[in-house]
Amino acid sequence: MKLLIIDDEPTIVDAIEGKLRREGYSTFTAGTAEDGMRLFRKLRPDLVILDIMLPSRSGFDFCRAVRENNRTPIIMISARSEDKDRIQGLELGADDYVVKPFNLAELSARVRAVLRRAGADAPGEPIESGDLVIDPRSHQALHKGEPMDLSPKEFALLQFLALNPGQAFSRQALLDRVWGQDAYVSERTVDVHVHWLRSRIELDPAHPKRIVTVRGVGYRFVS
């Protein structure tokens, strides 16, 4: 698998690259968001490890640009440890957020976990529910035959709920199953993503019929 590392600190890049190469990954590196984007378009990597603090443009800018039309997994790394930075990165579409300094073995484990969630654990057949079709193989959802513009986490949340119709899940359960137990996000993040999904699939988002609220519990998908 091809991994793209975007960071302007050579020492950190060398350490990450050495660890991941020893584990069998092909690694490519860039020191700026601009160079990273050029390599991203050329290589089509399986995963990006992205620093937030970059020269010129930030990692947030890179992530936002990629998520306009691409679902490649992104792990953000940063010395910023405040919740607002973690939340911003994850809500922009990052799949994980790791705070510097970090243990290389932990980063490697997170790479494996993100790659696994992005592909190996996904069911093979499309999920059909009325006018909604969710295809894990193409990582695309269709509503009334039209492609939906979903972030990776929106897609993962919709897919998980659709695979478990009629079952009520708490916000914490959805965080654990969709974002991962180590994700640094609040339960409010689930509410935000549900709001975005409802705006795309509900006839009247203010009175949802597909993703309904279960008072005192969380959410349930109605097929």
Image (cartoon, rainbow, N blue to C red):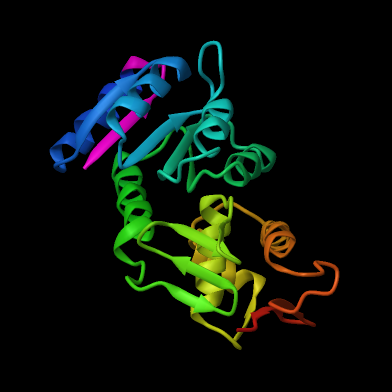
Report if residue 64 lies within the magenta region. Answer: no
Is 40 positioned to the left or the right of 86 in the image? left
- Residue at position x 58%, y 70% in the image: 174
- Residue sticking out furthest to the top: 56
- Residue at position x 30%, y 22% in the image: 29
Q: How many marks?
A: 0
The x and y percentages for residue 110 are 36, 50
Q: With respect to residue 196, does 90 lie above or below?
A: above
- Residue at position x 66%, y 70% in the image: 171
- Residue at position x 30%, y 25% in the image: 42
Task: Give the camera-side residue of 134 and 111.
Answer: 134
Task: Give the camera-side residue of 33 and 201.
Answer: 201
Which stretch is magenta?
A: 1-10
The x and y percentages for residue 162 are 54, 76
Is 63 positioned to the left or the right of 112 in the image? right
- Residue sticking out furthest to the front: 145
The x and y percentages for residue 13 are 32, 23
